[in-house]
Amino acid sequence: MDRDLVDFAIVGEWMAGQGLTGGDFENVQPIGGGTQNILLRFTRGGRDYVLRRPPKHLRAKSNEVLRRESRLLEALNDTDVPAPRLIAACTDESVLGGAVFYLMEPVDGFSPATGLPELHSSNAEVRHGMGLSAAAGLAQLGAVDYEKIGLADYGKPEGFLERQVPRWLGELESYSSNAGYPGPEIPGVDRVADWLERNRPTEWRPGILHGDCHLANMMFRNDGPELAALVDWEMSTIGDPLLDLGWLIATWPDGSVVGGSLVGALNAAGGLPTPKELIAHYGERSDRDLSAMDWYTVLACFKLGIVLEGTHARVFAGKAPKPVGDMLHTLTLHLFERAAALAV
């Protein structure tokens, strides 16, 4: 169980050192949602907390990813960006048996990936508002002065767009190290890559990039359509924020089983704004040039498709479940179909 991976006696001592509330740990419950990291909600001293730590089997960069994530969330605490509010972070992995962790305030809301409350499932206007609120939240994030909030060294924006295609083609090539993987059977990879290189925007302005911005990584208020928080910031960096908007469009439910696989219930319910409406709503809240949004959407399809293909490749080496790998490969093909339709 996830709870067994957290020694609450140690956490309690550490919390005391941070000046946080004391007492018994009550109502300890795991929080799901598709993340590989562990989330536990609990109450202590009358205050609610969520603890986040890496998975049981740490990967090479698990701790560093959570250190970065906690740093980013702390920097966002004093902004209007809808994000979990960081309470305190333990970046010393020796405290909890090899894993760093942090505490944040619980988000009052729901993930559309796990179902819709009655208000949202029964009202198309509310669902339409959810989509617009998602776009508005990305505009808020893109407007943050990252240097002013202490994130000047959080990423390497110089050459960010130029690095994307070779970086991800190299990632795709690396999958051949998985024994038995026949290589990527993804129609259109080279054509899409060539189109991206030939049509890359020449001017853009750096900002905070969430990096994995789809509806399943968002939480919405229970009492209305408003975005409560962007969650799961593991892929965040300093780059071009318009890639987040492109990512949202690339993964936007389109009524198909494959296209809506990230948020099945919301996809089935329908009533969401169109991609054009998302772009227009973002544009009303941002001074960024949105004339190349097709390019950012194609790049998002390209990048996410390659990321998902990695799990499919690991299936052949016995490192991932075949049903999951097959499903993600199908989604990869769908993303490249979307990319090819735009890359004209």
Image: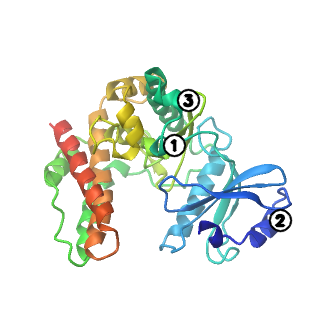
Label 1–label 2 contact, CB within 8 A: no
Question: Circle 2: is it few (<14), some (14-19), or many (20+) Cα within 10 Å?
Answer: few
Q: Earlier in the sequence, mark 1 or mark 2?
A: 2
The residue under the point 67% across, 44% down is 77
* In the image, residue 21 above or below residue 313: above
Query: Distance of mark 1 from mark 2, alpha carbons?
Result: 33 Å
Which residue in the protein does label 1 denote? 111
* 140 with respect to 323 (left or right): right
Picture coordinates of residue 133 (x, y %)? Answer: 50, 29
Q: Earlier in the sequence, mark 1 or mark 3?
A: 1
**Of 244 and 237, which appears nearest the observer?**
244
The residue under the point 28% across, 53% down is 305
Q: Which amino acid type corresponds to the residue marked 3 in the rendered image?
A: Glu
Question: Circle 3: is it few (<14), some (14-19), or many (20+) Cα within 10 Å?
Answer: many
**Res. 92 image quadrant:** bottom right
Q: Which amino acid type corresponds to the residue marked 2 in the rendered image?
A: Gly
Picture coordinates of residue 172 (x, y %)? Answer: 25, 63
* 129 with respect to 54 (left or right): left
Of the 4 image quadrants, the one containing the C terminus is top left
Of the 4 image quadrants, the one containing the N terminus is bottom right
Determine which of the numbered discs, if any, sits on residue 74 in the image: none
Which residue in the protein does label 2 denote? 17
The residue under the point 27% across, 51% down is 331
Label 1 vs label 2, nearer the camera:
1
**Of 222 and 227, which appears nearest the observer?**
222
Which residue in the protein does label 3 denote? 226
The residue under the point 29% across, 70% down is 315
